[in-house]
Image (cartoon, rainbow, N blue to C red):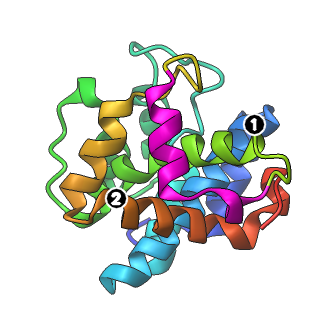
Amino acid sequence: MTTTPSRDEAWELVTSMTQSEQLRRHMRSVEAAMRAYARHFGEDEERWAVLGAIHDWDYESGPTAEQHPMRGIAMLREKGWPEDILDDIASHADYLNVPRDSNIRKTLNAVDEMCGFIIACALVKPDKSLSSVEPSTVRKKMKDKAFARGVHREELIAGAEALGIPFDEHVENVRDALKPIAQELGLNP
């Protein structure tokens, strides 16, 4: 397989390995954010979307640094997935030391944690609406260490910096990318 697999092929693999609706929603949110940033950078929207959808497909069955994402990458390699996509997947794991030397890799890293944090911010709003999440909301919640404690705050900031996009604009970009799929995420636009 020398071309990028289709989004449908990627999603079929995701659903075959991932039973958790929360984790599936995470991958859908990263897919949507990747798609939006591909448009922003004038890149291949489908390829970026496939990467966002598949990046954590093996996480549920092996969430440790010893297994994720190497086991999933090996499984995709056996299925003939292109090496460049496998390297892009590897780049989102800091401990693999794959350089984030392209827009697609920088973006995957920048949106991975941000998607989860924005969704968490929306879920605690009375209207559960993405439109209620402003950059100031995100900044305020970042200061609350008990809120979404699994999200590394420094990664949220570093991700925007690596993209060369002001933090508040990055928050708005990701939030707006999620609005079209808000209902899938259990939210209101």
**131 inside magenta stretch:** yes
Q: Earlier in the sequence, mark 1 or mark 2?
A: 1
Whether residue 162 sits left or right of residue 68 in the image: it is left
Report whether 142 appears left or right of 176. Answer: left
* Quadrant assignment for the N terminus: bottom left
Q: Please give the residue where the numbered disc 2 appears in the rendered image.
A: 107
Range drawn in magenta: 129-144
* Tag shown at residue 22: 1
Residue 93 in magenta stretch: no
Residue pictured at 78% horizontal, 52% vertical? 185
Badge 1 element: helix
Q: Report which quarter residue 53 is drawn in.
A: bottom right
Q: Residue at x 40, y 27 (%)?
A: 152
**In the picture provided, is 189 more to the left or to the right than 77?**
right
Q: Residue at x 27, y 63 (%)?
A: 166
Q: Residue 125 appears at what percent x and percent y?
A: 77, 46
154 in relation to 163, above or below: above
Residue 67 appears in view = yes
Q: CA distance from mark 1 to mark 2?
A: 21 Å
